[in-house]
Amino acid sequence: MPDSTVDEIKSKLNVEEVIGGYLQLQRAGRNFKACCPFHNEKTPSFMVSPERQSWHCFGCNEGGDIFTFVMKIEGLEFIEALKLLADKAGVPLQKVNYENKGEKSNLSDIVEASKKFYKECLKIKGGKKAYEYLRGRGLSDEMIQKFELGFAPDSWSLLSDYLKKKGFKEKDILGAGMTVKNEKGRIYDRFRGRIMFPVNTVAAQTVGFSSRIMPGGDESSAKYINTPETLVYNKGRILYGLDKSKIFIRQKDQCMMVEGNVDVIASFQSGVNNVVATSGTALTVDQLRIIKRYTNNIVFSFDMDAAGVKAADRGIWMALEEGMNVSIIRRFGCRQPAVRSR
Ligand SMILES: [Zn+2]
């Protein structure tokens, strides 16, 4: 990575603004101070210096620049922190030939392009029905936009035609999981006549989708279909909503685990934003360890039907084994949670 890119990003971002996006900073002379997010304290010993564009904690002796801060607080690798901050600074990274650029980044470009396509489709023809369905389930326009929901038209090739026109190759579109190849070698769009939920990494990069069949759609096909494992989509390590909720999880020092995508979105809408869901898998140990970067306190809020009880039960034992503090909210229907902790 050429230093010039790192320097350009640093020159465009103030350390106090970047850190102020995560912590409540108070002015202290020429510096700013806050309670340190990396150790437990009641009086602030975490200092931010605009002059030196650096931060330092006199309690735990951690310190560095915006990159080390973002890596540490978001639990990211350098390259992920770089992407996040480059985005914030408006510095294009495409010009940079870092090692990962290649097949992986090509696949994420395909997923990103698909997301745009699906979002556009939500506004036209068949998509309007999907939009009305989402609104009918009580989701606001704001949330539909925030979570970038979309619609996959009921067609065998609309998406792949669109992607090919954009210059993407058939084998890469297949590799990104956007199409399926049948036994006869015919390739067609994986998602057809479905409501689309983009699934993001913790660094807010879209790497796949989960989808729901349109109500009244082709009942012979599965109700929920997800992107399969790809080079960029590792299901067992992704939590739906975490890119948006991680800051709140850290602030509240608690993570709510709900069952599905719509539960996450509805929860955000009602103001409870320290929430995640697994996407298309049972909860994994990897996912719990990712949550532990932000908090050690987990609350399971699952439906108390048989499947919900079973899923919660497994998750609870795994979380306890990981040394987390576990609480349970039992939901009967959606409205009246009876809270019980242990
Ligand atoms: Zn500290």
Image: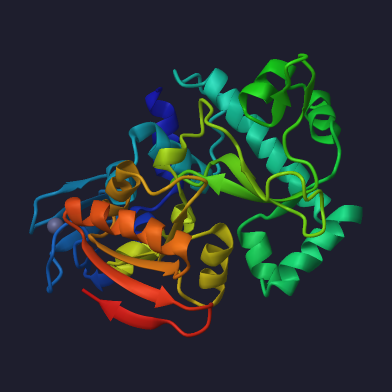
Q: Of 156 and 317, which appears nearest the observer?
A: 317
Please tell me in which quarter of the rendered image ligand 1 is found.
bottom left
Find residue 296 and report its image quarter: bottom left
> What quarter of the picture does the N terminus occupy?
top left
Q: Seen in the image, is 115 located left or right of residue 117?
A: left
Residue visible at 46% across and 34% down? 234
Q: Position of residue 87 (x, y in %)?
A: 52, 43
Quarter of the rendering containing residue 147: bottom right
Whether 305 is drawn above or below 197: the answer is below
Q: How many discs appear?
A: 0
**Image x and y of residue 119, in percent:** 75, 50
- Tell me the residue at 63%/30% (across/down): 177
Residue 314 is situated, as x and y percent measured from the top left of the image, at 32, 54
Residue closest to the far right: 125
Q: Residue furthest top?
A: 185
Residue at x 20%, y 58% (from the top left corner): 324
Q: Nearer the viewer, residue 214 or 55?
A: 214
**Image position, residue 137 (x, y; %):** 69, 72
- The quarter of the image holding the C terminus is bottom left
The answer to whether residue 80 is visible is yes
